[in-house]
């Protein structure tokens, strides 16, 4: 619901600002978090010392805490951990706390190793202290979020939306004014008009103006003079999906696309792919050799089936599977999707498809870098949903290829697999894929892998 404003007469002067100043409150929240984090880390180590060493307070635990805490606060401050508005996103805040304490612990271990003081530390106390400290840090943000929302509402920003003849805009928890009702113009020759606008903008963190494109240049000097983050509503840029504006020396560009994963996230995901796929290939090698032998003995044909599919960046790659169909009836273009009791499958093929064993060679695709453990499943070029090709059904279809395709994905663990008899079968999978891309995290990948292990054998595998 929009924050209501009292109706003002055109000649009435605004007495005071629309919104209270929040800068001081944001500073208080940040300082409070810093103090509570220091206390939380100290408490975590004291508890660890009491549990493991039977001492309270433990001198060793205090020593380790006083070394780690300043390092944690320094890294956290530079990493944005103490930005006040971050407390409103518990998931993001918890991840940042975890990341910061891990980096702090590794850094401290590195320093003490070269200082040859690690022998004086208790590794158990240090590990327990970091763990208990992290629990305190997350708990602080959990209760802090509830308190901040109760006092300040769902945001720690004051936002003003000025309706000046442009498209209608609705935004909850923002202040709204209409320039005609409140007698405001972008006229810089009228000091009274400038004063009126200045009163409205006072204490605002963000000002959004919805006006005609030809009027924007008139509003720019007023926003710059106010020293506030000023923005214009643009339907055209929204249709383009603009992300940001970049200024070069002689020109400006609009950013309309970006990688959903940053460099660090890509490295973490790749390390996870390499580690798990290497371990899985080692452990499953006897099973894979047995399956290969069974396929060869049944009809003497090739063991593997190779098919061209669309991967990351809409680039083709060859996916590997254990051959489950008769050689003469193999369908490299997937012009006919596999169905229950498919007459093309062999006896061995029916078993390995029902148990998902036919997918195991894709671990080589993961190891090579063509695929990931978790991601949108790659589709064959000729696959149909109903009577239409996949990409003809939804224009967002190609967006799913922004990440590497996966052995498994969010759509698969939700049960969206098997035949695509109707267009709805494709749209459900697509929506799950796009949701995965938007919400990727290491924890999400882990949950999908665990859930996949529980549905390897399912009624839609044929």
Image: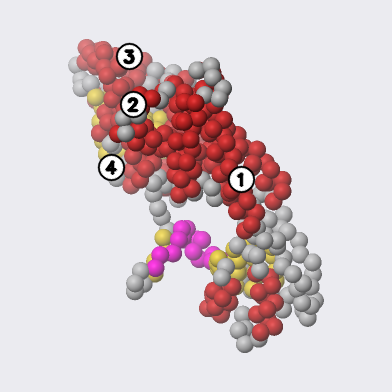
Looking at the rendered structure, which numbered label has been put on residue 291?
Answer: none
In the rendered structure, find residue 276 and report the number of the disc placed on it. 2
Residue 9: horizontal and vertical position, in percent? 80, 76
Residue at mark 4 to residue at mark 3: CA–CA distance: 31 Å
- Check disc 3 and report the residue beneath it: 347
Mark 1 near mark 2, Cβ–Cβ under 8 Å? no
Point out the tag, 3 or 2, that comes first from the N-terminus: 2
Q: Which mark is residue 32?
A: 1
Residue at point 47%, 31% (across, down): 63
Between discs 4 and 1, the one toward the N terminus: 1
Q: Secondary structure at mark 4?
A: strand
Find the magenta span and give its range.
233-247
Residue at which label 4 appears: 316
At label 4, counting other C-alpha atoms closer than 10 Å, the crowd grade (few under 14, some 14-19, many 20 or more) is some
Mark 1 vs mark 3: give the one in front.
1
Secondary structure beneath dot 2 equals helix
Cα distance between the residues tagged 1 and 3: 67 Å
């Amino acid at each position: 619901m929009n924050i209501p404003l009292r109706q003002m007469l055109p000649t009435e002067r605004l007495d005071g600002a629309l919104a209270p100043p929040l800068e001081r409150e944001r500073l208080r929240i940040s300082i409070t978090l810093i103090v509570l984090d220091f206390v939380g880390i100290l408490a975590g180590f004291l508890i660890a010392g009491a549990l493991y060493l039977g001492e309270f307070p433990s001198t060793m635990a205090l020593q380790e805490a006083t070394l780690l805490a300043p390092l944690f606060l320094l890294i956290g401050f530079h990493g944005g951990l103490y930005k006040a508005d971050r407390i409103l996103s518990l998931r993001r805040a918890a991840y940042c706390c975890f990341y910061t304490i891990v980096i702090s612990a590794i850094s401290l271990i590195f320093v003490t190793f070269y200082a040859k003081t690690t022998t004086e530390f208790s590794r158990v106390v240090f590990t327990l202290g970091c763990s208990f400290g992290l629990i305190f840090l997350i708990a602080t943000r959990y209760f802090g979020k509830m308190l901040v929302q109760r006092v300040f509402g769902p945001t720690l920003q004051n936002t003003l939306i000025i309706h000046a003849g442009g498209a209608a805009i609705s935004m909850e928890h923002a202040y709204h004014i209409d320039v005609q009702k409140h007698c405001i113009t972008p006229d810089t020759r009228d000091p009274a008009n400038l004063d009126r606008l200045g009163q409205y903008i006072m204490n605002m963190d963000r000002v959004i103006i919805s006006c005609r494109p030809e009027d924007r240049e008139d509003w720019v000097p007023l926003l710059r003079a106010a020293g506030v983050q000023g923005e214009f509503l643009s339907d055209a840029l929204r249709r383009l999906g603009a992300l940001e504006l970049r200024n070069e020396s002689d020109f400006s560009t609009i950013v309309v696309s970006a990688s959903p994963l940053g460099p660090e996230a890509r490295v973490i995901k790749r390390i996870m792919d390499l580690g798990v796929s290497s371990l899985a290939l080692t452990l499953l090698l006897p099973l894979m050799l047995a399956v290969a032998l069974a396929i060869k003995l049944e009809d003497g044909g090739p063991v593997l089936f190779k098919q061209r599919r669309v991967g990351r960046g809409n680039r083709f790659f060859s996916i590997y599977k254990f051959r489950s169909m008769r050689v003469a009836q193999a369908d490299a273009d997937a012009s006919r999707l596999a169905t229950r009791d498919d007459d093309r499958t062999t006896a061995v093929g029916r078993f390995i498809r029902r148990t998902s064993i036919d997918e195991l060679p894709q671990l080589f695709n993961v190891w090579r870098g063509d695929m990931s453990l978790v991601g949108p499943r790659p589709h064959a070029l000729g696959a149909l949903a109903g009577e239409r090709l996949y990409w003809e059904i939804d224009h967002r279809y190609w967006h799913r290829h922004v990440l590497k395709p996966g052995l498994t994905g969010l759509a698969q663990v939700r049960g969206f697999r098997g035949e695509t008899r109707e267009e709805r079968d494709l749209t459900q999978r697509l929506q799950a894929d796009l949701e995965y891309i938007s919400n990727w995290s290491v924890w999400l990948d882990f949950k999908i892998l665990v859930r996949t292990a529980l549905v390897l054998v399912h009624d839609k595998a044929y």
